[in-house]
């Protein structure tokens, strides 16, 4: 990582891996939106089972709880910018959340990719550079609030232009599986029951899922549930309520998984609620 800053619920970074290691880029899920600007490398981006071959100077967007990962294809230098921010970032001036439509008004894993045919990528790079290169926290705060707003408006305009365009990125298998899992996420589901539902052996199902999504089926389910639990804790639910409402049936296993994933206990997350 070249530079990274985390303040006021916004996390921005400029990453550079001279010899990227695939194991350093596992599937992950955020509770905030993300804009990812790809500069160089040989990388496919997987989002909820959709595969996007990245081109230099292209943009990916992800909404909260949308599972994604960079799949490193070789050791070519991998450089990128990214910023994470809450959906409420511009709520004071955009009370109807128009600028969040590209993130929220689409299916999981659909319409994540924007090319240089849709966005002025030179301007996108200048925006990220100005946010990263700010000389002080005060300058960075001002720059992010002005420049990120401009970037969101650019993406919103591109979203409106393509609104009636049909783009199918997902293989049929992962499209059906991802939809089914998210519809039944808080129910008692296992890899075996999922495999049976889709008429596959557990090993076939796991292999196909890992290929399309970038993680094992259970890791995907676990991280989705943990992210949900954290959001419930932020809303003030007790740790036990958050555990059971997000699909866990055993508090001790929920607790261990939560600490492993978030590096803090559920109680610590809950105490951060204003």
Image (cartoon, grey):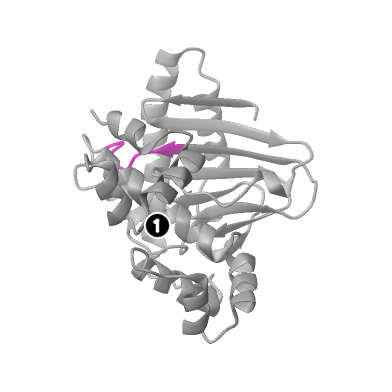
149 to 29, vertically: above or below: above
Question: Quadrant of residue 139 in the image?
Answer: top left
The residue lying at 47 percent from left, 46 percent from top is: 257
- State the residue position of label 1: 159
Q: Is residue 66 visible?
A: no
Q: In this orientation, which residue lies closer to the viewer: 96 or 264?
A: 264
Most foreground residue, 234 or 116: 234
Q: Is residue 89 inside the magenta stretch?
A: yes
Q: What residue is drawn where x is 52% and y is 76%?
A: 192
Q: Nearer the viewer, residue 167 or 1?
A: 1
Q: Which residue lies at the image location 51% right of the left edge and 41% below the top edge?
A: 260
Q: Is residue 181 magenta?
A: no
Query: What segment carries the magenta color?
Result: 84-90
In the rendered image, residue 199, in percent from the top left (x then y), is placed at: 53, 87
Where is residue 210 shown, x and y percent of the image?
62, 65
10 Å neighbourhood of mark 1: few (<14), some, or many (≥20)?
A: many
Please tell me whether the stretch drawn in magenta is mainly helix, strand or loop.
loop
Residue drawn at the location 44% of the way across and 15% of the way down: 137
Number of on-image labels: 1
Q: Quadrant of residue 203?
A: bottom right
Q: Quadrant of the C terminus?
A: top left
Is residue 193 visible from the viewing direction of this image? yes
Residue 179 lies, in percent from the top left, at 41, 71
In what quadrant of the picture does the N terminus appear?
A: top right
In the picture provided, is 187 more to the left or to the right than 130?
left
Q: Nearer the viewer, residue 88 or 197?
A: 197
Q: Secondary structure at mark 1?
A: helix
Residue 34, position as x, y percentages in the image: 46, 44
Residue 7 against residue 206 in the figure, above or below: above
């Amino acid at each position: 990582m070249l530079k990274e800053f985390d303040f006021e619920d916004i996390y921005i970074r400029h990453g550079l891996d001279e010899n990227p290691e695939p194991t350093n880029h596992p599937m992950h899920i955020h509770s905030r939106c993300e804009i990812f600007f790809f500069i160089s490398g040989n990388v496919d981006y997987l989002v909820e089972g959709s595969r996007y071959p990245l081109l230099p100077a292209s943009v990916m967007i992800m909404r909260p709880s949308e599972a994604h990962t960079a799949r490193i294809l070789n050791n070519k230098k991998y450089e990128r910018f990214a910023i994470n921010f809450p959906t409420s970032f511009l709520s004071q001036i955009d009370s109807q959340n128009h600028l969040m439509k590209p993130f929220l008004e689409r299916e999981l894993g659909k319409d994540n990719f924007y090319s240089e045919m849709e966005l002025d990528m030179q301007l996108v790079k200048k925006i990220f550079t100005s946010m990263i290169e700010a000389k002080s926290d005060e300058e960075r705060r001002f720059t992010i609030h002005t420049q990120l707003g401009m970037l969101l408006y650019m993406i919103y305009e591109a979203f409106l232009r393509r609104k009636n365009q049909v783009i199918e990125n997902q293989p049929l298998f992962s499209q059906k599986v991802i939809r089914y899992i998210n519809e039944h996420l808080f129910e008692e589901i296992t890899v075996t029951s999922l495999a049976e539902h889709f008429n596959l052996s557990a090993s076939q199902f796991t292999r196909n899922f890992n290929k399309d999504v970038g993680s094992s089926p259970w890791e995907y389910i676990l991280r989705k549930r943990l992210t949900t639990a954290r959001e419930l804790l932020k809303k003030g639910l007790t740790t036990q309520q958050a555990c059971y409402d997000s699909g866990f049936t055993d508090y001790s296993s929920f607790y261990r998984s939560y600490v492993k994933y978030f590096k803090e206990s559920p109680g610590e997350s809950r105490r951060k609620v204003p």
